[in-house]
Amino acid sequence: MEKGLFDGLLVIDCASFIAGPAAATIMSDFGARVIKIEPPVIGDSYRQLINVPGMPPAAEDYFWLLDNRNKESLALDLKHREARAALERLIAKADVFITNFPGPIRERLKLTPDDVLPLNERLVYASLTPYGEEGPEKDRTGYDATAWWARSGLMDSVRANPDVEPAISVPGMGDHPTAVALFGAIVAALYRRERTGKGGVVSTSLLANGLWSNGLWMQAVMCDADFSVRLRRGQRGALTEIYKCRDDRWFMLAMLNHQREWPLLARCVGHPEWLEDPRFATPEARRENTGELVGLLEEVFLAADWPEWHTRFTEATITFGPISQPGDHLECGQVAANGFLPEIEDAGGLRTVDSPIRMAGEEKRKPRRAPSLGEHTRTVLADFGFGEDEISRMIECGAAAG
């Protein structure tokens, strides 16, 4: 196994679903050893998300593959005394302990900071909650769809026009950025440990990250901004609108420097005369005649397919963004050049999504397949000093599985 920045660090992933475990995944990308604790028989309930109606069918459990690569699965029933003893032995040697269990479950399983930190004063205890560590909702359950997307105000704000119903979020849409925040908190705590020798508690929540993602609108509210008017298509400005091409592909213009980019666009679309047209010659005129200009641009863009417009926009140095579909990235030269979709080791060319953090001079490990339930139970327990007889007894009594 190749070494990395976090080679020698031991991370205990005692969490479920995405936001907590994905922070451990980023640690693993940089070389940390990550041991995932799962209940025997059923495992992490995230393993079942692929079966929820509406999820695109596939031969691979792509959810599990992405967020649990590089990890070792240790199946322990933490309600058993023997399993608890095994976990405590791991915690005593660990650097990071990650959990997102609801408060009452942590208390029942003795996994609160007060229970865990006395076992290892250098341990970083990383806590992920839906709504925060304090307050009347601190023990409420939630997912990124409820706590990050809906509760934060993003779901209400992100609409094509005021009459459209709120959109359902994509799975993991808020979990993965929240995982990056938790990763950052963990690394900050590890830095503090280098200075003090002590670990401690770090935390973040889906709601906090949702509010941060919606931060500009939240700050506007706190500055008494007027949100009573919501603009419709054709009112937002012709140079910051979305358009459809002849092949039904959509793209976005994001031209905020009108003085520079309006002449580029007019010439790019073959209408340099618009530069002298009194309806569009000045920013004020274009604003006053937004609907008319949007209509003219719609006709122009419907006359060619997206690849042609992509080429023309690029050559004209216009600021734009294709409204991509996931499959577009598989053959994208920009994605390939940056290694954003690396191959999984010994997986016949199957790829995954890289975590978004890079560090010059540090190579990430090549991704390994996510583990099957309890795949590493015997190996991990042996590594931490359990004899074969002890391991077999734990498995026979249901404290472990493997």
Image (cartoon, rainbow, N blue to C red):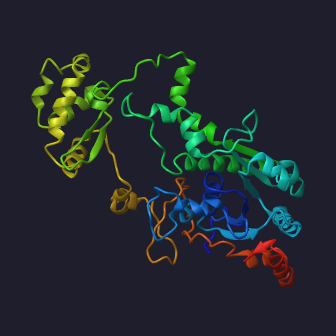
Residue 232: image location, x then y, percent: 33, 26
User: Measured along the vertical axis of the image, is residue 124 above or below residue 331?
Assistant: above
Q: Nearer the viewer, residue 255 or 224?
A: 224
Compared across the picture, whether 202 is left or right of 259 comes to right
User: Measured along the vertical axis of the image, is residue 27 above or below residue 265?
Assistant: below
Compared across the picture, whether 252 is left or right of 87 comes to left
Residue depicted at 11% across the width and 37% down the height: 270
Compared across the picture, whether 298 is left or right of 24 comes to left
Residue depicted at 74% across the width and 45% down the height: 202
Residue 169: image location, x then y, percent: 49, 45
Q: Quadrant of residue 122?
A: bottom right
Total labels drawn: 0
Residue depicted at 24% across the width and 17% down the height: 288
Most extreme residue toward the front is 53
Q: Nearer the viewer, residue 340 or 388?
A: 388
Most extreme residue toward the bottom is 389
Most extreme residue toward the left is 273
Q: Nearer the viewer, residue 334 or 392?
A: 392
Residue depicted at 13% across the width and 43% down the height: 303
Is residue 147 visible to the viewer in this orientation of the structure? yes
Residue 14: image location, x then y, percent: 73, 59
Name the quarter where the C terminus is drawn: bottom right
Residue 308: image location, x then y, percent: 18, 50
Q: Nearer the viewer, residue 39 or 185?
A: 39
